[in-house]
C-alpha cells in the first residue's frame, strides 16, 4: 500500500472526528448555559480581583455591572433560559458572561473620585488609594498609580490592562472545566454512535472504496475555510439559517445517522443487543464482532476512548487538520498526474 492510502485513512478519521466534535461543541454550549459555567467562573474571578466590599457595593449600582455581582439564579430559571419555557413563564433575568476591562477600570477610578476629593496628580491619587481598606486590589492599584505619573488616562489604561491580564489568567480554570466536560461528552457520543477509532481505521485501511468516499467528502468540506468558521460561530442555528452551513450540519447528521455521506464507514449500532454484547455488558452472552474487529470488549473500549480524546479537541482543530491533510494529498497526487502520457 502506498503512502497516499495512509493519508486517506487519516482523512477518513478526521472526517469522523470533525462530525462528532460538532456534537460536542453544541452540547458544551447547552451545559455551559444550563449551569452558568462562564458566568459563575467570572463572578468568582471578580470576587478574587475586587476584594473590597465597599467597592463591590459601589460597582453593583451600575446597571452594566450589576449582573456580574448578582447572586446565581435557581435551576428553574436556568432551564427557562436554556429551553423555550420563557414563552409560558416569562423571560428570565439575563446573566453576564463577559466584562469589558476598560469599562470596569473607569468605574473603579470613578468610584475612587466619588469617595475622596477630586484628584488630578499622582500624589492625590495615592492619597485616595491610601484611604481604602487594606486589600489585594488596593496594593495592585497603588503599584499601578506609582508608574502612571500624573496622567489619569494612563492610570485608567494600566488598570484596564491589569484587569484583562488577571481575568485571562484566572480563566484557565474555566478552560480546564470545559476540557473535562468535552472528554465526558465525547465518550458518551463515541459509545452512543459506535465511533471506534481502531475499527474505522482498520476498515479504511482495507477498503479502497471507503477511503475514496471519505476523501470526496473531505474535498468538498475543505473548500471554504471562512464559511466553516462562520458556521461554527453561528452554533446550532447555522444549519437552519444559512444554506451554506448545511454541509457541516449534515456532516454531524451523517455521523449520527449512518447516511449515504459516510455510509462506507462502520458507524453506529444495528441493535441494542449488539452494543451491549460488543462492549462486554452482556455477561455470558456473546456475539461475533463487527467488520473483523478484534474479539473482546477491551479493544472496543480502547477505540472508543481514543475517539473521545480526539473529538474533545474541538471542531476547529479537526477542520484545520483536515485542510492540511487534503493539501498533502493534493501534493502527493501531482507527480502522478504529471508523469502520465498525454
Image (cartoon, rainbow, N blue to C red):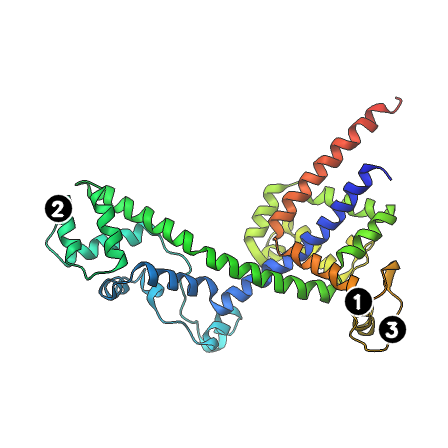
Residue at 56 percent of width and 47 percent of height: 230
* Callout 2 secondary element: helix
Quadrant of the frame with the N terminus: top right
Residues 7 and 316: in front is 7
Mark 1 surroundings: few (<14), some (14-19) or many (≥20) residues within 10 A: some
Residue 286 numbered tag? 3
Q: Earlier in the sequence, mark 3 or mark 2?
A: 2
Mark 1 vs mark 2: in front: 1
Instruction: Tell me which corner region of the image, top left, top right, bottom left or bottom right, holds residue 241.
Output: bottom right
Q: Earlier in the sequence, mark 1 or mark 3?
A: 3
Residue 123 numbered tag? 2
Residue at 12 percent of width and 46 percent of height: 123
Reading the image, the residue beneath label 1 is 297
Q: In whole angstroms, how far apart are the C-alphas of marks 1 and 3?
A: 10 Å
Mark 2 surroundings: few (<14), some (14-19) or many (≥20) residues within 10 A: some
Residues 254 and 110: in front is 110
* Callout 1 secondary element: helix
Instruction: Tell me which corner region of the image, top left, top right, bottom left or bottom right, holds residue 59.
Output: bottom left
Q: In whole angstroms, how far apart are the C-alphas of marks 1 and 2?
A: 72 Å
Q: Is residue 88 above or below residue 328?
A: below
Residue at 11 percent of width and 51 percent of height: 118
> Does residue 270 appear to the left or right of 80 in the view shown?
right
Instruction: Say if mark 1 contacts mark 2, CB within 8 Å.
Output: no
Amino acid at each position: 500500500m502506498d503512502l497516499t492510502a495512509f493519508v486517506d485513512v487519516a482523512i477518513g478519521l478526521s472526517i469522523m472526528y470533525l462530525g462528532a466534535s460538532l456534537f460536542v461543541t453544541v452540547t458544551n454550549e447547552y451545559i455551559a448555559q444550563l449551569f452558568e459555567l462562564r458566568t459563575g467562573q467570572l463572578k468568582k474571578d471578580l470576587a478574587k480581583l475586587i476584594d473590597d466590599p465597599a467597592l463591590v457595593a459601589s460597582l453593583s449600582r451600575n446597571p452594566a455591572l450589576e449582573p456580574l455581582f448578582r447572586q446565581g439564579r435557581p435551576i428553574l430559571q436556568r432551564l427557562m433560559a436554556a429551553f423555550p419555557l420563557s414563552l409560558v413563564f416569562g423571560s428570565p433575568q439575563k446573566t453576564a458572561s463577559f466584562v469589558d476591562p476598560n469599562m470596569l477600570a473607569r468605574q473603579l477610578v470613578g468610584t475612587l473620585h466619588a469617595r475622596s476629593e477630586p484628584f488630578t496628580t499622582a500624589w492625590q491619587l495615592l492619597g485616595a488609594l491610601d484611604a481604602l481598606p487594606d486589600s489585594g486590589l488596593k496594593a495592585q492599584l497603588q503599584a499601578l498609580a506609582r508608574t502612571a505619573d500624573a496622567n489619569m488616562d494612563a492610570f485608567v489604561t494600566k488598570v484596564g490592562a491589569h484587569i484583562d491580564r488577571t481575568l485571562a489568567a484566572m480563566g484557565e480554570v474555566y478552560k480546564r472545566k470545559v476540557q473535562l466536560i468535552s472528554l465526558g461528552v465525547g465518550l458518551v457520543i463515541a459509545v452512543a454512535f459506535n465511533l471506534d477509532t481502531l475499527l474505522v481505521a482498520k476498515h479504511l485501511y482495507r477498503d479502497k472504496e471507503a477511503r475514496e468516499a471519505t476523501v470526496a467528502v473531505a474535498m468538498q468540506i475543505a473548500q471554504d475555510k471562512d464559511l466553516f468558521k462562520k458556521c461554527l460561530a453561528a452554533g446550532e442555528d447555522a444549519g437552519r439559517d444559512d444554506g451554506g452551513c448545511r454541509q457541516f450540519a449534515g456532516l454531524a447528521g451523517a455521523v449520527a445517522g449512518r447516511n449515504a455521506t459516510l455510509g462506507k464507514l462502520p458507524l453506529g449500532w444495528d441493535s441494542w443487543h449488539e452494543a451491549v454484547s460488543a462492549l462486554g455488558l452482556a455477561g455470558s452472552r456473546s456475539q461475533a464482532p463487527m467488520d473483523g474487529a478484534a474479539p473482546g470488549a477491551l479493544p472496543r473500549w480502547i477505540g472508543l476512548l481514543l475517539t473521545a480524546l480526539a473529538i474533545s479537541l474541538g471542531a476547529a482543530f479537526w477542520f484545520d487538520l483536515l485542510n492540511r491533510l487534503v493539501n498533502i494529498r493534493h501534493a502527493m497526487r501531482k507527480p502522478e498526474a504529471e508523469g502520465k502520457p498525454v
